[in-house]
Amino acid sequence: MRIVVIGGGPGALYFAISAKLRDAGHDITVIERDPPGATYGWGVVYWDDLLDALYSNDAESARELRAASVLWQQQEVRLRGETAFYAGYGYSVERAALLEILGRRAADVGVRVRYQEEVHDLSGFRDADLVVAADGAGSRVRQQGEHFGTTLSTGANPYIWLGTDKVFSKFLFDFRETPAGWVWCHAYPSTSGISTFIVECQERTWNGLGLDGPAGDASTSALEEIFSDVLGGRRLISESRGRPARWLRFTEVVNDRWHHDGVVLLGDAAHTTHFTIGSGTRLAILDAIALAQSLYERGDSLPRALDLYEKRRRRPMMRTQAAARSSMAWFERVDLYTDRDSVAFAAAMAARQGSLPPWRHQLHLLEQLAPARAAHRCYETGHRFFLARRRGEPLRSTSFAPRRAPAGTVPAARPRTEDLPAPQARSVAV
Ligand SMILES: Cc1cc2nc3c(=O)[nH]c(=O)nc-3n(C[C@H](O)[C@H](O)[C@H](O)COP(=O)(O)OP(=O)(O)OC[C@H]3O[C@@H](n4cnc5c(N)ncnc54)[C@H](O)[C@@H]3O)c2cc1C
C-alpha cells in the first residue's frame, strides 16, 4: 500500500514504524515541515501502561525511549509556600529525544522521512492509497473540506511551555499569589540537566502582570522573578529546538468522523486533551498502533480497516476528553480552592476528574508523614520492577543518553490491539 503521512510528530513516526513492521511491503513516506531535530516544547510525561504498549509493539524503540527517559518518584503541591506531598511516579522524556529516536527507527525499518516540506493541500498525493493526517491540533489536512465534523473550543487560561536548567527531581506544582491573582508552574525533570517548566495563570492575572505583551525576554524575566526561589536563581529557557515559546491557550479538537475518502486523522489532528492530564503523546502513539493493526487485520479492505480503527479509538476517546475538560476547568477556577491548606488543596486537585474514593483520601493524609511516603515508595519500586520484568525491560535502562538500535528488526509476535491498554485519563500530578 502507498501511504503518505503528513507531519513528523510522535504519532506520525510511530504509525509509520508500526505499519512497516507489520507489512514490510508498505511504501510509506512521512512529510514534516520542520528540519530534523527541530521541535516545540520540552519534556512529556508518561506511565507504565505506555511502556507496556511500546514494548509489545516494537521492543527496539521502546528500549531506546526508556533509556532516554527520567523517572520521577514523588509529586509535591505547594500553595503559599506550604508543601503537600503526593505519592505516585511517572517517566518523562524530552520531546526532541523522543522524535530523534522515532525518526531514526523509522529510517531503519525503511520509512522515507522528508523534512522541511510543508504540505498545503493533498493535490500532490492522488496516487496514495492512504493519507494519514498527523499534522497536529491545527491540522491543515483536516481543514480541506468539511468532512470530519470538527469542533474546536478554546480554554480560558494562558500558558507557556518553558524549560529550565534548574534540575527538578520530582513533579512540582507551585501556586503563587500575586497582586494580580494566581499564577502557577508545572515543573518536572525532562532530560539530563534540563527540566520542563510550564507556567499557567488566569487571564486577569496575565493582564495584570503585564505578561500579555509579546512573549520573550521580558515575560521570561518576570516569571523568573515570581518563581525565583523555586528556580534557585537558575534561568528559564524559552527556545527548545525550534522557535521561542509563546503564550498560548489550549484548543480542544473533537471530530465526529476520523476518516473520509482515504484520508484518516491521527493524534492531535483527531483529538486533543488538556496538558494537565499529560496524555496527548501517549494517545497519539496508541492511535498509531491501532491504525497500523487495523490495516494489518483488514488489509483486504481499506474502508473496513479505517472503520475498525475509528471504532477502536474514537468512542473511548470521548471519555478521555471529558476527563481532560474537567481537569482544564479545575485550573480555570483554581481560586475557588485556594482558601484551603495545602493538603486539602492537593486533595481537591486530585479529585478534579471525579471524586476520590474515601481510602484514597485517607492515604493522601497518611502520605504527609515521611515514613508512610517511604513505605509507599518501596511498594511502588517493587511494582515497577515487576512490570519492567514482565515486559522484558533490561534492568539498567535509566541512563539519559539515547542509544542507537540495530537496524530492521521486527517483532516476533504481532501485537493485538485488544492487548493494548484502553484509553484512559491519567492525572499529571495527583
Ligand atoms: C504544554 C504542553 C504539555 C504537554 N505535556 C504532555 C505530556 O506530559 N504527556 C503527553 O503525553 N502529552 C503532552 N502534551 C501533548 C503532546 O505534546 C501532543 O498531544 C502530541 O505532541 C501530539 O502528537 P502528534 O504527533 O499528534 O502531533 P504533533 O506533535 O503536534 O506533531 C505534528 C507535526 O506535524 C508537523 N506539521 C504540521 N503541519 C504540517 C504541514 N502542513 N506539513 C508538514 N508538516 C506539518 C508539525 O511540524 C509537527 O512536527 C503536552 C502538550 C502541551 C501543549
Image (cartoon, rainbow, N blue to C red):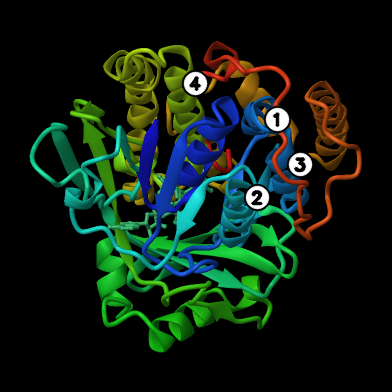
* Residue 341 pos. (x, y %): 55, 47
Q: Which residue is drawn at 47% across and 85% down?
A: 221
Q: Which of pointers 2 and 3 indicates the residue nearer the eye? A: 3
Q: In which quarter of the image is residue 357?
A: top right
User: Type of residue at label 1?
Assistant: Tyr
Report the residue marked by disc 4. Answer: 293
Residue located beneath label 3 in the image: 63
Q: Distance between the residues labelled 2 and 4?
A: 26 Å
Q: Are marks 2 and 3 in contact (CB under 8 Å)?
A: no
230 or 426, nearer to the observer: 426
Compared to 408, does 338 lie above or below? below
Q: Position of residue 202 (x, y in %)?
A: 31, 60
Label for residue 92?
A: 2
Note whether residue 302 is visible: yes
x, y percentage for residue 188?
63, 57
Q: What's the distance in space between the residues labelled 2 and 3, CA to CA?
A: 14 Å
